[in-house]
Image (tube, rainbow, N blue to C red):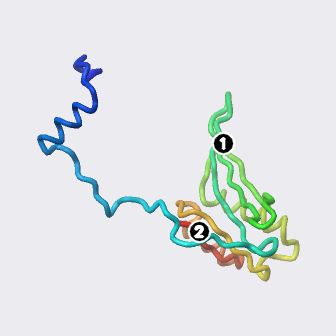
Amino acid sequence: MRYIDGLDINRKRVYRLLKEHGLLVTANTRLKAKRTPTGTKPRPTCPNEWWGTDMTKVLVQNFGWVYIVFVVDWYSKKVAGYYMGTQCRAKHWLMALNMAANRQFHDGIRVAGVNLISDNGSQPTSAGFMEACAEMGVKQAFMS
């Protein structure tokens, strides 16, 4: 109303009028996201027992957005593998995981018993990524 009609009206007044006329949208409590953790995070006791993976994006001046996928060893806090590029798809997450596996295990990762924990994003829950983890012998766990 302020920008289209040029009326200077307080948002609290608009809220009060909508509430009086029963025009507010009721909140659907079934769709509310859980903000409290449902379980405890694992505590690693040795290196290469639990790895965590996540993605972030960074704005690079005069270039644009760059996506960075990290695989971190939760025991030593060491970055075991990463991917950096202008796109962020499941294959790029797999590239970071492959880098971590090749850097940490020269004899192969299948017998190592690595657990990988990530969020419930579309890349780590994709069929291709989950199949590749199973083929590598990496057990996946998801944080909620």
Question: Image point 62% across, 48% down: which residue?
Answer: 87
The reply, left or right, for residue 109 in relation to residue 35 is right
Say which amino acid is labelled 1: Val
Question: Image point 66% across, 42% down: which residue?
Answer: 66
The first of marks 1 and 2 along the sequence is 1
Please provide percent x and percent y for residue 33.
Answer: 42, 60
Q: Image height check: is 26 above or below 43? A: above
**Nearer to me, 25 or 120:** 25
Please provide percent x and percent y for residue 144.
Answer: 52, 66
Please provide percent x and percent y for residue 112.
Answer: 79, 79
Looking at the rendering, in which quadrant would you find the N terminus? Answer: top left
Question: Image point 67% across, 70% down: which residue?
Answer: 116
Please provide percent x and percent y for residue 75.
Answer: 78, 67
User: Which residue is farthest bottom?
Assistant: 111
**Nearer to me, 54 or 10:** 10
**Cβ–Cβ under 8 Å for marks 1 and 2:** no
The residue singled out by tag 1 in the image is 66
Other residues around mark 1 within 10 Å, as few (<14) / some (14–19) / many (≥20): some
Say which amino acid is labelled 2: Gly
How far is mark 1 from mark 2, CA to CA? 23 Å
Total labels: the figure holds: 2
User: Which residue is farthest left?
Assistant: 21
Query: Secondary structure beneath disc 1?
Result: strand
The residue singled out by tag 2 in the image is 128
The reply, left or right, for residue 127 in relation to residue 134 is left
Q: Image height check: is 29 above or below 40? A: above
Query: Secondary structure beneath disc 2?
Result: helix
Quadrant location of residue 70? bottom right
Quadrant location of residue 142? bottom right
**Nearer to me, 37 or 125:** 37
- Between circles 1 and 2, the one closer to the viewer is 1
Question: Image point 28% across, 58% down: which residue?
Answer: 28
